Image: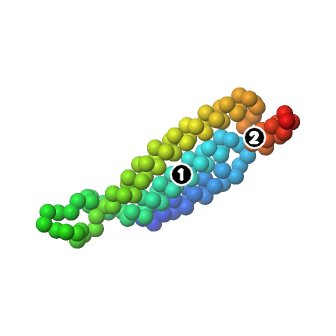
Amino acid sequence: MEVVLALMTGILYAAGIYLMLRRSFVKLIIGMILLGNGANLLIFLLGRIAKGKPPIIPEGLKSMADAYADPVPQALILTAIVISFGLQSFAIILMKRAYSVSQTDDLDEIHISEREEI
């Protein structure tokens, strides 16, 4: 299971970077979303997958004897999901505004039109 998730992380990173290198603003945002999801999956994998093992120390013990689910990566991923949602919302609104002003989503044409105005 971990090998499949590791491969999926690599695929998400590769697709995200590929899309971020395109000239379209929409592809840039989609690439950013894929890269963020790949990072979340990587953090999840680093916390080790322990199915059905709660992070609770049984009464009478001072430390965990068996495998347990680490709650820190899960909390980090939840925080990262909320932050990435805010960033995605901002980027979509920014893209909408840039498109309404320049009538294109090509990043090179947006940059050229800025030079002509100056």
Q: Is residue 109 visible?
A: no
Q: Residue furthest left?
A: 60
x, y (%) of residue 67?
Answer: 28, 68
Give the mark nearest the N terminus, 1 or 2: 1
Crowding at mark 1 (Cα within 10 Å: few <14, some 14-19, many 20+):
some
Residue 29 position by quadrant: top right
x, y (%) of residue 75?
Answer: 38, 52
Q: Who's the residue at 68% across and 41% down the image?
A: 25
Residue type indicated by callout 2: Asp
Q: Who's the residue at 41% across and 48% down the image?
A: 78
Quarter placement of the C terminus = top right
Q: State the CA–CA distance, disc 1 to disc 2.
A: 23 Å
x, y (%) of residue 57?
Answer: 21, 63
Q: Who's the residue at 23% across and 59% down the image?
A: 56
The residue identified by callout 2 is 106
Q: Who's the residue at 65% across and 40% down the image?
A: 26
Badge 2 marks a residue whose secondary structure is loop
Badge 1 marks a residue whose secondary structure is helix
The residue identified by callout 1 is 36
Residue 110 position by quadrant: top right
Above or below residue 42? Residue 94 is: above
